[in-house]
Amino acid sequence: MPITFIIECNKCSGLLLATIEQKTKTCPYCGARIDLHRVKRLAKAEDAFSASEMLRQIKSKRQSNPKRPKIT
Ligand SMILES: [Zn+2]
């Protein structure tokens, strides 16, 4: 399984997963085409399982901090 990144759509701030091999990805939330070399990477995971775990954690952090939606 390739390295997986958790990325943030720069249009709608939706969270999605992308592998290191991908160059572009279409946001499932707003349909924007995302350039994976330019997008903000929130986290890096060694495999898909830990990626989905991280994604879940980031989402729950966002829900508990509605005034600070961006993870830095
Ligand atoms: Zn989007």
Image (cartoon, rainbow, N blue to C red):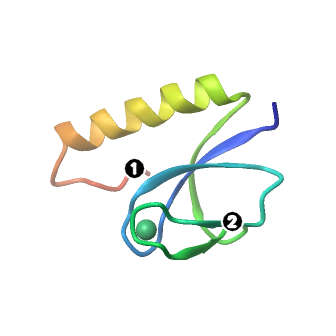
Question: Which image quadrant: the N terminus?
Answer: top right
Q: Which residue is mark 2?
A: 36
Q: Is label 2 in a helix, a strand or a loop?
A: loop
Image point 50% across, 31% down: which residue? Answer: 54
Q: Which quadrant holds residue 41?
A: bottom right
In the visual, does 26 lie left or right of 45?
left
Q: How dense is the environment of label 2, judged by Cα within 10 Å: few (below 14), some, or many (20 and up)?
A: many
Q: Which residue is mark 1?
A: 71
Q: Which numbered circle lies on residue 59?
A: none
Residue 66: x %, y % from top left: 16, 50
User: In whole angstroms, how far apart are the C-alphas of marks 1 and 2?
Assistant: 18 Å
In the visual, does 39 lie left or right of 22?
left
Residue 28: x %, y % from top left: 47, 60
- Amino acid type of the residue tagged 2 in the rendering: Leu
Image point 40% across, 63% down: which residue? Answer: 29
Q: Is label 1 in a helix, a strand or a loop?
A: loop
Residue 32: x %, y % from top left: 50, 76
Residue closer to the observer: 30 or 15: 30
- Between circles 1 and 2, the one closer to the viewer is 2
- Amino acid type of the residue tagged 1 in the rendering: Ile
